[in-house]
Amino acid sequence: MNLNATLIAQAVVFLVFVVFTMKFVWPPITVALDERAKKIADGLAAADKAKTDLANAEKRAVEELKSARESATELRSGAEKQANQLIEDARAEAARIVAAAREAAEAEAAVAAQRAREALREQVATLAVAGAEKILRKEINAQAHADLLAQLKSEL
Amino acid sequence: MSTEHAAEHAVAHAPNAGEYVAHHLTYLNTTGHKQTALVDWSVLNIDTLFFSIAMGVVGVGLLWLAARKATSGVPGRFQGFVELLVEMVSDQAKGIIHSETSRKFVSPLALTVFIWVFFMNAMDFLPVDLLPRIWEGIYGSMGGDPHHAYLRVVPTADINATFGMSFTVLLICLYYNMKIKGVGGWIHELFTAPFGSHPVLWPVNFCMQLIEFAAKTISHGMRLFGNMFAGELIFMLIALMGAAWTGFNAPSILLFFGHFVAGLAWTLFHILVVALQAFIFMMLTLVYVGQAHEGH
């Protein structure tokens, strides 16, 4: 247990090691530790943010789906209405065309009947004249009896 | 190892137990022989300085290796271990010293103290005769007298080393006393604390303060020195049991067995002492510097 200059040398060595540790050992390690702590905190915050973002996105998706469904329903009912309208219109048009066709046919038939009647009248007159000729056994002057024939024609 | 060396020693030079222990307790100093004066500022213990610097380079170097490649990403095992040490010291420092700026110096100080003292203490785990015998061989081959090849391998078993550190801690405490309280404030505290500011109490207070500083510093250095010196001494006494080997006879075999059992038990217990004393030295350093920050 003798004291000597080793004491002072040891103190100097001690301070040198302390300064070395302070300059080259402590700062890099504490910086690394702090940085890692920050990274972890950031990561946790990002995870939280992502979670809320996801929840928001899901909510939005549900809303979008709902509105899409609504607009689809609206569209479908509109289309149905329009289709019904179209069918109604077509039906009315068809009815109109059928009526017009029937009318035209009826008119044509009437004209034809009239014509037939006319023709018949002519033939009836001729037949009547021929019949009368046969009955009277004499030539009838068509000219003289024209009035009579016309009267007969109109009576038919 | 120690058994063989001690036995050879006994056969070759036949020193008695007292001579063996005395030889082992003599420092390799700049004079080449045992220091006789209690205090001699012209002498340096080369062995203490060599091993303390070597252990400091190893300990602080290991920390530096980890710090050099420190990454804030995923740390390796080695970096993780060093980070564990740093966190431990940092937590202790935060609990004791509340000034952020002081901690920038005091935390690395505490880490250095812990790692350095641990490695210096751990020199005790080497077989007690290993390095001295190697040095005897080197010294002898250099033409020296092997009988005077002294070497002590545990720097903390040298009171110069422990006092060198505890005095440095004292100087740091005085610096922080003046820095935190101001020179005037500190001198005021020296004379008015702990008993009061009445002028009659000034000398009493001042004496108390001096005793406090002296007691703190001396007990700080003495505690570590005492533990390590005693540990080393007991390793020598255990080695002596094996050194009493005289052939295959009952007492020799019994003593050899005793050497083995006691050596194992003391080494295992010493693992605790080495780590604990390093931790205590660090904690006391922090506590003393912390006290310098607080007014009475």
Image (cartoon, helix red, strand yellow):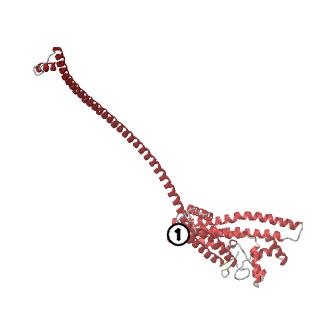
Which residue is at the far left?
A: A144
Q: Please indicate, yes or no, whether residue B178 appears anywhere in the rendered image.
A: yes
Q: Residue B175 appears in which quarter of the rendering?
A: bottom right
Quadrant position of the N terminus of chain A in the picture: bottom right
Can residue B45 be seen? no
Vertical relation: B195 (above or below) A61: below
Label 1 SS = helix
> At 76% across and 81% down in the image, what residue appears?
B148
In this view, A18 is above or below A130: below
Q: Residue at x 51, y 71 (%)?
A: B183
Pinpoint residue B200: horizontal percent, then vertical percent.
Answer: 55, 67
Question: Which quarter of the rendered picture does the C terminus of chain A lie within?
Answer: top left
Q: Residue furthest bottom?
A: B143
The residue that label 1 is drawn on is: B186
Q: Which chain contains the residue that carries disc 1?
A: B
Q: Position of residue A47 (x, y in %)?
A: 50, 54
Mark 1, residues whose alpha carbon is within 10 Å: few (<14), some, or many (≥20)? some
Residue A128 position within the rendered picture, expressed as x and y whole percent measured from the top left: 18, 18
Residue under the point 72% across and 69% down = B124
Q: Amino acid at mark 1?
A: Trp
- When the figure is inspected, residue B31 is found, relative to residue A96, above or below; the finding is below
